[in-house]
C-alpha cells in the first residue's frame, strides 16, 4: 500500500474530500527530484492495483485525461458489491470485481501477478485482516483534520510494523515505509 493521511490518521474528510493534500505543508517548496514523494518508483514496482469503490469514485471525480493518468498500464480492479459498472471516464483503465477477495488473489497469482498496490481505507483493512499486505508506505501530511475517514478500521489481530524507514520532505510531509508482520 502507498497512501497519504493527515497527521491524525484520516485519508479523507467526512464528505470524501482530499483537497487538503494540496494545501497542507509548505506549498511553495520545490521538492525537486522528490516531487512525487516516491510514487513513480512505487508504481513502477507493482503489476496491478486493487482499490475500493470509494477510491474509484474519488478517482472518477478528478476527470483525468490520458496524459494525467498516474497508474500507467497496470491492471486496476475496483472492489464493489453495489456498483456493477465502472464510471464512463474510467472504463479504459478500471474493471469492477464483486466476488470473494481470496478468489481474486488466486486468479491474479495464477495469471502471474506478483505485487499488487492496495488502496482505500476499508480495502486496506480487509487485506490486512486476510494477511495480504506485506509492506506499507504512509505519507503523513502536516495537517490535523479532527475528523474524517480513517486509514485503518478494526483489524482482527494486532499487526506489527517493522524495519521503519522515514523520510522528511522539505514541505513538512513525513513518509514512513514499514514491513508488515502478522502476529
Image: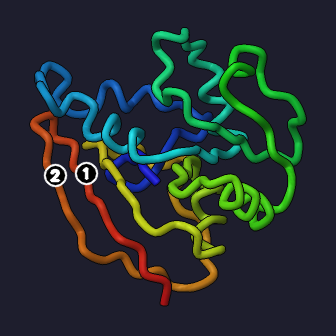
Could you say whether the residue bearing mark 2 is in a helix, strand or loop? strand
Residue found at the very far bottom of the displayed protein: 183
Left or right of 41, for residue 75: right
Question: Colour scheme of this structure image?
Answer: rainbow
Q: Name the residue under label 2.
A: 167
- Reply above or below: 107 against 161: above
Q: Disc 1 to disc 2, how far (Cα)?
A: 5 Å
Q: How many marks are shown on the rendered structure?
A: 2
Residue assigned mark 1 = 175
Residue 159 sits above or below residue 45 on the image? below
The residue lying at 36 percent from left, 76 percent from top is 161
Task: Describe residue 12's horizontal placement relative to residue 109 as left or right.
Answer: left
Which mark is drawn over residue 90? none
From the viewer's perspective, tell me whether residue 17 is left or right of residue 92.
left
Q: Where is residue 44 in the image (x, y as percent from the top left)?
A: 39, 39
Q: Which of marks 1 and 2 is nearer the N terminus?
A: 2
106 versus 121 height, above or below: below
Q: How crowded is mark 2: few (under 14 residues within 10 Å), some or many (20 or more)?
A: few
The x, y position of residue 136, in whole percent, is 40, 60
Viewer-proximal residue, 130 or 26?
A: 130
- Image position, residue 107 (x, y; %): 76, 58
- The secondary element bearing badge 1 is classed as strand
Identify the residue at image location x=31%, y=25%: 23
**Up-down: is 57 above or below 148?**
above
Residue 79 vs residue 147: left or right? right
How crowded is the residue under tag 1: few (<14 C-alpha within 10 Å), some, or many (20+)? many
Please say if the residues under marks 1 and 2 sit with CB atoms less than 8 Å apart.
yes
Q: Residue at 32% of width from left, 67% of height from top?
A: 178
Image location (x, y in percent) of residue 166: 18, 59
Amino acid at each position: 500500500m502507498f497512501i497519504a493521511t493527515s497527521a491524525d490518521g484520516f485519508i479523507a474528510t467526512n464528505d470524501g474530500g482530499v483537497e487538503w493534500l494540496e494545501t497542507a505543508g509548505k506549498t511553495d517548496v520545490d521538492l525537486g527530484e522528490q516531487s512525487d514523494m516516491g510514487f513513480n518508483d512505487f508504481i513502477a514496482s507493482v503489476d496491478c492495483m486493487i482499490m475500493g469503490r470509494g477510491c474509484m469514485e474519488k478517482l472518477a471525480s478528478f476527470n483525468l485525461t490520458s496524459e494525467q493518468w498516474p497508474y500507467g498500464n497496470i491492471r486496476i480492479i475496483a472492489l464493489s458489491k453495489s456498483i456493477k459498472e465502472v464510471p464512463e471516464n474510467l472504463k479504459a483503465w478500471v474493471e469492477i470485481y464483486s466476488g470473494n477477495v481470496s478468489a481474486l488473489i488466486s486468479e491474479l497469482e495464477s495469471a502471474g501477478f506478483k505485487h499488487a498496490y492496495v488502496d482505500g481505507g476499508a480495502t486496506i483493512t480487509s487485506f490486512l485482516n486476510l494477511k495480504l499486505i506485506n509492506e506499507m508506505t504512509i505519507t503523513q501530511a502536516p495537517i490535523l483534520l479532527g475528523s474524517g475517514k480513517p486509514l485503518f478500521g478494526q483489524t482482527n489481530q494486532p499487526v506489527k510494523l517493522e524495519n521503519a524507514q522515514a523520510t522528511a520532505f522539505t514541505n513538512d510531509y513525513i513518509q514512513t515505509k514499514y514491513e508488515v508482520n502478522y502476529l
